[in-house]
Image (cartoon, coloured by chain):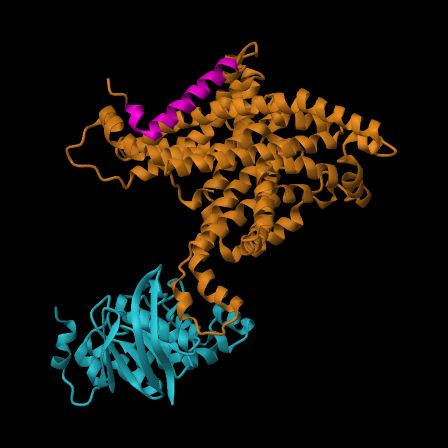
Amino acid sequence: MSLIELREATAGYNGHRILHDVSLSIRQGERVALVGRSGAGKSTLLRLLYERVNGDAALVPQDFGLVKALSVFHNIYIGRLNKHSVWRNLANLVKPLQSEVDGIRPVAARLELEVKLFDSVGTLSGGQQQRTAVGRALYQQETILLGDEPVSSVDEHQARTILESIADSKKTVILAMHDTALALEYSDRVVALRDGRVVFDESCDGMTPADLKPIYAG
Amino acid sequence: MEAVWRNSPTVRTSLVFLAIALACLAVADIAITTVNPWTEMGRLVAGIFTPNFFATENLGMALVLTVAFAILGVVIGNVLGFLLALVFHSRMVRVGCAFVRAVHELFWALIFLQIFGLSPLTGILAIAIPYAGIIAKVYAEILEEADKRPLQAVPAGSSRASVFLFVCLPDVWAHFKNYSLYRLECGLRSSAVLGFVGLPTLGFYLETAFRQGQYSEVSALLILFYVIIASMRVWMRKPLLPIYILVSLLILPWGAAKIDTANIVRFFTQDIVPHPIRTAETIDGPALAALWDWFEHLLVGQAIPGAIDTMLLTMIALVASGLLALAFFPLISPLFYGRFGRSAGHIFLVVVRSTPEYILAYIFLQLWGPSMLPAIVALALHNGAIIGHLVGRYTEEMKLRTDAARGLNLYAYEVTPRLYGQLLAFLFYRWEVILRETAILGILGIATLGFYIDSAFADIRADRALFLILLTALLNIGVDALSRAIRARLHLRTTIEQG
């Protein structure tokens, strides 16, 4: 029984077609890496999957989607905006509630953001912002996570921290990835896109980055 | 000869406006009618340099009340404007806001005087209502330009209010705060001017002092007013705002006039109903004929001549403002003056732009007598200083090559061509502001629409006054639309902060 199912799906923007006849079935608990050159349609495919689950997934967008004027704490809190009443949200916006701080501090600590917890996101570096966006998705209670290049702005050590924390807290994970070595290491299935079509969809078992070279060729 | 204007729509537009202004100037009345204008001017200048801060004990109170009206008016306008900005997509709200902001604060004050008398409510509402219309528009524009990207990452099922609080509001909060401060500065000027229609603010004491020729007192009042405006960012602190609101509420003279409900009812059900209808027993043929007479009389005798004079003055003042802005901007530009010269330029521009046009016009009118000249000079100085200041600051970021020309060549070949579009954008933006102000200067005795409106109120003919106010508002909305069309055609754009 698959969790998300696409059958010969097509998608595009402004009459410009980006995905052609994509069929994809994702089962619960799978960890899927989407690979392919930039412009191959990875972001569009993620968008499509997100719509297919009616937003019942945590999202790490490529541009992070952070509210720059708010603190790391508040940006992570946005992940559970739907779990509380407006009044509680408002109270927490005016002055962080101790119970929320207690809940969010471990998430930030795991992503090495604890010292920046009450700094506004606009003052952070690109890598810190990316970790904040991941923190928000982790804090969100959905069990599916869709990430668009979630480790593009951090070094390898932090990339591993991020990928491990995602693996620990989310059941089903679909990540568009640039670094094929990391993609293979943290996934059990790899889907490759080229010019808007799925050209490769296999288990990662025993695969090496060299096996993915042809996808980027020519 | 290759004419420049053939290829440049900006230059062509400018020349057309210049020609219109010159034609207007040819038919406008700009005579100096006072007997000894320059002796009086000499006495005024002498007074300006010998301010007397202890002339009356009312001076402190006048300033405190000026600030109190401004704070309450702007705070209420801000709250209303914010709420209206949230529903600004509704056509009805947009049209309503365009209408209330097309009517000048002083006209609102004249209307509320009929309803509430000299109660503080008159002053507060006169500021709050038009400001709500302006603020709603500006806030709606700011919200529209807010960063929409975080919306995609918000968990599904979040309430709209929560999303607004966490995603939209934080992004625009700083803009709202800045704009509110700018509005407070405008509110202080509006509040000061409200004194001219009888409220106990700065304008009231200024008028008295002027009438008695107490120029040293005039000087003291104005200097303190500049200090309050210039130091606004120091004394206006968020934690102090509730205290200011409370003190303002307590200090205003609520006992000055009793609010009489019968008065309010009479205003809406009788005073503003056109006279022939009010006195007719039944609405029949003769009553309608009388109404037509009333209308025709008003249109031919007052509305049309008033509108013509208003437009004449507006066009002359608009072009004169542009010319003065061209002369003023180098005064504060590091490209033309050193640190010392620039400081003097800054002080000059701050003083000229902080003085409400109405007060400037009043001063020149006392000196030169009633004609369009005082109004032209006042409007051009005030608006020229505002635009000159904005454009001058813009030159601070201008990067020129190191071997660029100097002096007049630099001005004509390098700097002015680069900022001319910006200057025109500001100027056209202020076109509607100048028109609104021109209409109001009629209250001082210049034959613009305000003159007829003020006279109608003085004759207790609120029906006529309201008709003329309506017409003024429509003229305003028309000019605003025209200005927007020209700005769009010439691809001129200003920042929304300058509303």
Answer left or right for A161 relative to B279: left
The residue depicted at 50 percent of the width and 78 percent of the height is: A83
Towards the viewer: B4 or A86: B4
Chain B shade in the render: orange
Q: Is residue B314 visible?
A: yes
Q: Where residue A23 appears, x then y in whole percent?
A: 31, 78
Most frequent secondary structure within the magenta stretch: helix
Q: Is residue A148 above or below residue B42?
A: below
Answer left or right for B383 relative to A126: right
Q: Where the N terminus of chain B falls, by quadrant?
A: top left
Q: Quadrant of residue A54?
A: bottom left
Furthest residue in direction top, as rendered: B35
Towards the viewer: B185 or B417: B417
Q: Where residue B82 appears, x then y in whole percent?
A: 55, 54
Q: Is residue B235 above or below residue B215?
A: below
Q: Where residue B432 appears, x then y in whole percent?
A: 51, 34
Asked whether A192 falls inside the magenta stretch, the response is: no
Q: Is residue B408 above or below residue B194?
A: above
Chain A shade in the render: cyan
**Number of residue marks:** 0
The residue depicted at 35 percent of the width and 85 percent of the height is: A170
Q: Is residue B331 visible?
A: no
Answer left or right for A175 relative to B380: left
Q: Where residue B167 appears, x then y in whole percent?
A: 44, 64
Furthest residue in direction right, as rendered: B281
Q: Which residues are magenta?
A: B4-27
The residue depicted at 46 percent of the width and 44 percent of the height is: B231
